[in-house]
Image (cartoon, rainbow, N blue to C red):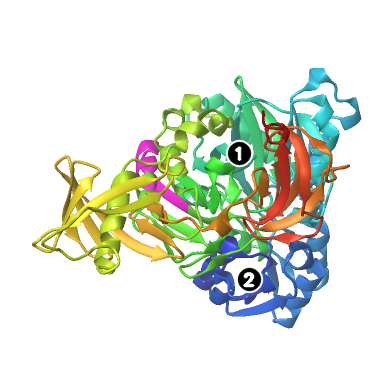
Amino acid sequence: MLSTLLVANRGEIACRIFRTCRDLGIATVAVYSDADADALHVREADTAVRLPGAAPADTYLRGDLIVKAALAAGADAVHPGYGFLSENPGFARAVTEAGLVWIGPPPAAIEAMASKTRAKELLGVPPLAAADVTADDLPVLVKAAAGGGGRGMRVVRHRADLDGELKAASAEALSAFGDGEVFVEPYVENGRHVEVQILADTHGTVWTLGTRDCSLQRRHQKVIEESPAPGLPPGLVASLYERSAAAAKAVGYTGAGTVEFLVADGRAHFLEMNTRLQVEHPVTEAVFGVDLVALQIAVAEGDALPPEPPEPSGHAIEARLYAEDPAARWAPQTGRLHAFELPGGPGVRVDTGYASGDTVGVHYDAMLAKVVAHAPTRAAAARLLARGLERARIHGPSTNRDLLVASLRHPGFTEPARLGTGFYAEHLDALTVPPPGEEYAAVAAALADAAANPSRFGGGWRNVRSRDEHRAYTGLAGAGDGGHEVAYRPTRAGGYQVTSPPGVRAVAVAADRVSLEVGGIVRHFDIARHDGTVYAGPHRLTPVPRFPDPDDQREPGSLLAPMPGTVVRVADGLAVGGRVEAGQPLLWLEAMKMEHRVTAPASGTLTALHAAPGRQVEVGALLAVVSTDAQEEPSA
């Protein structure tokens, strides 16, 4: 029986594994980088061991340091979680050779399946040779051979772009997984991403624990997952089970794993086998009433599974909450989580690696939490999850919360026949429309500020008043048109009369809560202020200063860092004085384990370049300046 387990990972998956360990009476050990010294997974573990440094390559990808940490802490087992070293056979061997129990499949099985190129060859679907790709093969997908989570993946639609995308994907994969091998496969447009959860013991039993649909993806990374996959013909499901079990038996697999397929035109195309726990495993746990981590540990201890898995019940949906801005090409966001209160309770589960007061940094994945709803039907689960997310209180970096809520209510999701991996490519503009009511949130923010600062914002009634008090705020809906203008005046009774926008009556006003009546309906807004931002209910607003700071003005054509990160590459031949074309990639930033391309906003001349490979930049840092053709033309 195991007594102490080290988790070779961080964030929410480490916290989730620790939870099961506590239930089983197993002591826990965390490892942490310098950037994670005060992270939630470190606080929740019984003991923790430092991995000096911050970059993944220096810390969580250093298998030798993790094995030493396990031995030093007196652990007798290692669980890899997912990502990082979870599918690295060399790490699995190092763990077992050190006399520790590996909570995962045998290294030989990982070796056979963890490299996607070797897995495809084993199952008779070899990848394409990059040198042989022609225009007739397009589009194709460049994909990392190790790891997952969308890192090291690129869709190529033009043959001339292939070499550059191979280089970019390889660099991203090397940074994320310590392995830069990439390969090319045909890209199936808007198929459904369907997978089968398997669990196998050392006594020859293989369970297939239902299907999952993971079609809603951005940047080839899953956003919303559910079990069972809706609307699949029974014959196709039976075929998926049979092929998945056969793949596991072919390599002597034990433990938890996932076989992934792309379903299109009634056919299932094998994608890969993930030899580890998946991010979306909670939906399977909810439907089958099992704890997959507990079962992984039981298998590692030599226990036999029952001949058949439990019967499934109901439907479960998981949404991944990210610190990112979907409307800005999914740019990751960083900063302090002043408030981070997610829904829990009957039918709702939250797995997270953050709490209020924690800081989201630049070194790791942007996922903050997974929220899972389980209900008797798919529609009920979607309703429960959407409403729970809508009620979450998140003050700090921008997140995809509103996108998740809109996605769960969109016909492209609610009607299973319309599911496909092209969901966000087709519907993103509609899904990123700001939620209604922001103009009223601005009114609530203005009145709350007046109540909190009566002398500054005209909070007191006067016999003679020359004009109304005015405040303006920008938000998602009012960011490009000068913001939301609010006008109000104090009343003799100590309240406030809203004069603009029309049709709004102040019911109750305090510094931290405002109630407004609009069209006969009373709406309540809880108010909070952090770092110059006002949070009014679910809305995030920025006060518009009456007199802009001249230091904030930038030269036209300035390219600013959209997020904090590291400059990893500058375009070949790029130099001050050179000609650039609109949309031309100029440099690449790495943040949160992904590369982000910075392009020329217009055609013109590069007049300044402040970026160099290896340079750390903060959000808003000046990277380059492009003087556009219009700017360069002499005036008449």
The image shows residue 137 at horizontal and vertical percentages of 79, 21
Q: Where in the figure is residue 628, as x and y percent of width and height?
A: 70, 36
In this picture, residue 210 sits left or right of residue 509: right
User: 451 or 333, which is in the foreground?
Assistant: 451
| Residue range corresponding to the magenta coloring | 371-385
Badge 2 density bin: few <14, some 14–19, many ≥20, Cα 10 Å: many
**Lower sequence index among marks 1 and 2:** 2
Q: Secondary structure at mark 2?
A: helix
Where is residue 426? Give x, y as percent. 54, 28
| Left or right side of 330 for 578 | right
* Residue 479 place in picture, x, y as percent: 45, 44
Q: In front: 352, or 379?
A: 352
Q: Amino acid at mark 1?
A: Glu
Per the image, the residue denoted by label 2 is: 36
Task: Indicate the amino acid at tag 2.
Answer: Asp
Closer to us: 511 or 243: 511
Q: CA distance from mark 1 to mark 2?
A: 32 Å
Residue 145 lies, with reference to residue 89, above or below; the image says above
The quarter of the image holding the C terminus is top right
Relative side of 298 to 625, left or right:
left
Q: Does the magenta run of residues contain 382?
A: yes
Q: Residue drawn 51% across and 47% down?
A: 284
Residue 309 forms part of the magenta stretch:
no
Residue 29 circle label: none
Mark 1 or mark 2: which is in front?
A: 2
The residue singled out by tag 1 in the image is 195
